[in-house]
Image: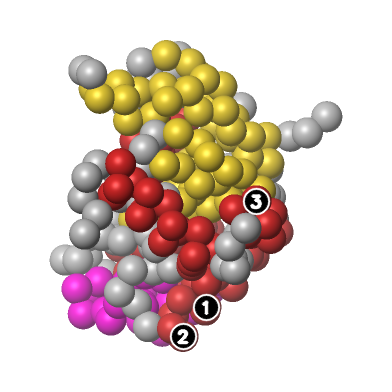
Amino acid sequence: MTEYGAQAVGLRKAFGAMVAVAGLDLDVGRGEIFGLLGPNGSGKTTTIRMLTGLLEPSSGGATVAGIDVVHSPEKVRERIGYMSQRFGFYEDLTIEENLRFYGGVYGLTPKERRVRVKEQLDRYRLGDRSRHLAATLSGGWKQRLALACATVHHPALVFLDEPTAGVDPASRQLFWKLIREHAAEGTTIIVTTHYMDEAERCDRLAFLSRGHLIGVGTPEDIVKRFGLPSIEAVFVELQRRDEADLGLAS
């Protein structure tokens, strides 16, 4: 029997007459790196907000780490980590203070916090800078701290919402190495990105267009399905179609 990190069945969200997500069916395996792609306005953010328990679906349902997002959204949030391009930490705290703070937010005991903070400092190579204020860090180091904060409680699933926007190529490469390590340990990763070279590093991809799921599969599967030479070409074509449908094409 397949063990799912996340599963959605008929997941739908409407805001009045506007349907943001239309009957989404999705299975994400445990330990899978799963890319959620699509042009702006395709429904990615709304989908993530429903899967994290922050937004109640209009209909349908989903489970994340085996927990129902409709009936137990607060329990879902205990089992997940979330990281966005805005880096969710406090710049007036040091690296170590941020990790201790998030350990407390996620309910770790003082003993667990001490152990996990040391683990994160070592794993993310932050130990030498542990007393540096977060505000003084470069983009790549801030990215590393944000991921360390999001995973300090050993979540079952981590949402990464355009996590490498604005960081240099070397930092992006290290970031994906760390993500692969987490996935190898059984952590499910759901990532949104506008970097198509990163999309190609995902185990599987789901493409959304105007709230509809229009393709799921490995990067190779997606390219074959659309008959285009690359994932980037698929993305550009979907954006062109959406703009044409909205009358925005030049």
Residue ID for mark 1: 174
Q: CA distance from mark 1 to mark 3?
A: 31 Å
Q: Are marks 1 and 3 in contact (CB under 8 Å)?
A: no
Q: Which residues are magenta?
A: 122-144
Residue 245: percent from left, percent from top:
30, 41
Residue 212 in magenta stretch:
no
Q: Quadrant of the N terminus?
A: top right
Label 1 to label 2: alpha-carbon separation: 6 Å
The answer to if 143 sits in the magenta stretch is yes
Q: Main secondary structure of the magenta part?
A: helix
SS at mark 1 in the image: helix
Q: Where 73 falls versus 85 (above or below)?
A: above
Q: Secondary structure at mark 2?
A: helix
Amino acid type, mark 2: Ala
Side (left or right) of 33 relative to 14: right
Q: Residue tagged by mark 2?
A: 170
Numbered circle sitting on residue 225? 3
Image coloring type: secondary structure
- Residue drawn at x 36%, y 54% as measured from the top left: 239
Mark 3 belongs to which amino acid? Answer: Arg
Amino acid at pointer 1: Leu
Q: Is residue 152 above or below residue 107?
A: below
Disc 1 crowd, CA 10 A, few/some/many (<14, 14-19, 20+): some
The earlier-in-sequence mark between 2 and 3 is 2
Q: CB of mark 1 within 8 Å of CB of mark 2?
A: yes
* Residue 60 at x, y percent in the picture: 48, 16
Would residue 6 be visible to someone looking at this image? yes
Q: Which quadrant holds the C terminus?
A: bottom left
